[in-house]
Amino acid sequence: MLTVKRTALAMLMASALLSGMANAAEKTTPVFTPELDAHIGEVARDYLLAHPEVLVEVSQKLQAQQQEKQQQAMTAAVIKHQAALLNDKGTPSYGPADAKVAFIEFFDYQCSVCARQAPVIESLMKANPQVRYVFKEWPIFAQRWTPSLTAAKTGLQIYQQKGADAYLAYHNALYATGHDEGRLTLADINSAAAQAGKLEGKNDEMPEVLSGTDALAQNLGLRGTPGMIVMPVNGVTADNVTVIPGGADQNVLQAAIDKAAGHAKK
């Protein structure tokens, strides 16, 4: 709420009241006139010029309301698309098959925020081995930097042929290079992939998985990477889902896991 002693609204109401009283006394029907409208506009303008902090408060309030609506819409979309988030066998995942909570990240290896998030997630995984971690390869920078797409395809190929442990080693090795924002190279990718051993065939069949992830991200309302979702594997509701469109520290992510597990701090 705006906490000011005098507001343009109060002036407007006072002017309208005085005008209404005068008109009532004269038994006339019009309350507002062009002259009164112009006067109210001048009063409001002068007040806002003298108190610009009111505009800042209004802008902040509007932004908060928009963010809340965005969160509500994304949460509803998560509930609607929970099967695609949790049960896509082509998507790399790591953790117990019977996990009660899932942590899902949409990411691109060239994304600098994703790179800063990677060690946070590594630490989170060590602290929460009971959670299943789902890695949604979403190379949104592929049109700008070709290695973005190559890295994603290679990761999917390693997961499908070598399993979760090999994939996670590759995933962490790429981020450990510190090469993002166009600096990731084919040499980086090949070096990280070499740890998994020889791969069979080409990775040309991976675009179907990637296109599905892209469609899912669009349906969820994600606008960039990283996009993180923490949710229970069963019994998903608006009260136990957390959607984080952007980076977050480990405390925030831990609170989301606790909430999804049903023992969030109150």
Image (tube, rainbow, N blue to C red):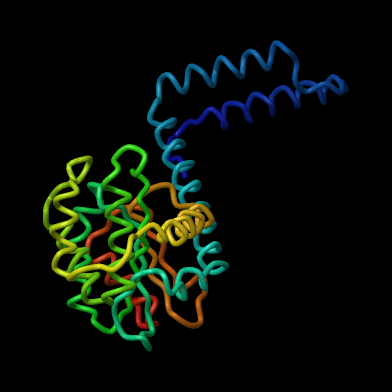
Left of 91 or right of it: where is 199? left
Q: Residue furthest bottom?
A: 98
* Image x and y of residue 149, in percent: 33, 50
Residue at 57% of width from left, 67% of height from top? 80
Seen from the viewer's position, the closer of residues 161 and 221 is 161
Nearest the eye: 192 or 265: 192
Q: Is residue 158 left or right of residue 49?
A: left
Q: Quadrant of residue 51?
A: top left
Q: Is residue 265 above or below residue 190?
A: below
Q: Residue at x 46, y 36 (%)?
A: 58
Q: Residue at x 29, y 40 (%)?
A: 145
Q: Is residue 12 left or right of residue 262?
A: right
Residue at horizontal 50 percent and vertical 76 percent from the top: 236
Give the total of numbered labels: 0
Q: Residue furthest front?
A: 201
In the rendered image, the residue lying farthest to the top is 35
Location of the C terminus by quadrant is bottom left
Residue 57 position in % (x across, y down): 41, 37
The quarter of the displayed image where residue 190 is located? bottom left
Q: Is residue 43 above or below residue 145?
A: above
Locate residue 76, reporting x and y percent: 55, 63
